[in-house]
Image (spheres, rainbow, N blue to C red):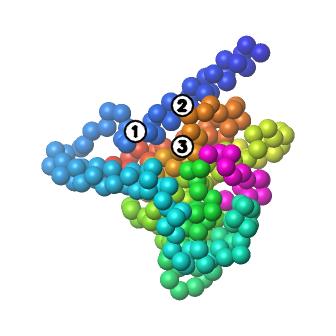
Amino acid sequence: SKTRDRLLRDQKSYIYQLFGLVRQRRPEGATDSKEDDAGEDKKAEQDEEAEEQEDGDEGLAAFGRGLSAAAVAAYAGVDGDSPSACLLRCEELLAAALAGIRPAARAEEALEGLLGLLPPESSLGSWELDLDCLRLVVRLVPTAAAALAVFGEERPPAAWRRFLGLVLSAPLRIEEELSGAAELEVREVSARLGSLVSLLASPAAARSALRVSLAALGPSLLSANLLGRMALAVPPVLPSAFGGPLSERG
């Protein structure tokens, strides 16, 4: 029992150290490679501050109220109290966008509508998912990325960045106390989602996704199961967000 308690404390300490890193804009000790890049670095910092403002507080709270008419119409008739229904409609819309004209614009509308119904910054108890929903989230990620053509885009749409925040926090919205096999699947999906975000997100989008997903946690302590899921979802994203030459550009 003492060993188990110690391991749990160590796990919590590890996760909250990760949270501290995520809340930093750049890794500790990071330096610019050339002095003559100072102007570009200054602009990048200003861009990132603007990005944080867009993703944070007032901007996030107002996002659902500022949906386009097309985004609202796309989810007409959908039960907004059913995350499953919302995700299924989003899957239909993204598939149609990918096969039609103006795929990026239609995909952005699909994500905007989904995020208006399932705001990723909302506290974990405000809306919940089940395993079928979690599997559906996995399917949405590559379809949304393809429709938006975000690969290689340093400044993708805000809807994509917030959607990635929903993706990272999705495993935390599953029932905490699951049976062994079900919890194992949730953790496997958590790792897969983290890898998908790491693969598809630009540095700026990865940082936004981390901020948005952490906003849902609030100040409360997480259970051992939730900590375990976060420990699998977050670490793959950190190198994309903070490490390497691409992250310094983004």
- Whole-percent x, y for residue 232 in the image: 62, 41
Q: Which mark is residue 137?
A: none
The amino acid sitting under disc 1 is: Gln
Considering only order in the chain, which callout, 2 or 3, is on the residue closer to the N terminus? 2
Which quadrant is home to the C terminus?
bottom left
The residue shown at (33%, 54%) is 50
The tally of labels here is: 3
Q: Magenta residues, as a range? A: 123-138
Give the mark toward the camera: 3 or 2: 3
Q: Which mark is residue 16?
A: 2
Neighbour class for label 2 at 10 Å: few (<14), some, many (≥20)? Answer: some
Mark 3 residue element: helix
Considering only order in the chain, which callout, 1 or 2, is on the residue closer to the N terminus? 2
Considering only order in the chain, which callout, 1 or 3, is on the residue closer to the N terminus? 1
Residue at image mark 3: 214
- Whole-percent x, y for residue 153 in the image: 41, 65
Residue at image mark 1: 24
Q: Nearer the viewer, residue 108 or 145?
A: 108
Answer with left or right where residue 97 lies relative to residue 208.
right
Neighbour class for label 1 at 10 Å: few (<14), some, many (≥20)? Answer: few
| Up-down relation of residue 226 to residue 138 (above or below) | above
The residue shown at (75%, 40%) is 176
Mark 2 residue element: helix
The residue shown at (37%, 42%) is 25
Answer with left or right where residue 64 lies relative to residue 245.
right
- Whole-percent x, y for residue 12 in the image: 61, 27
Mark 1 residue element: loop
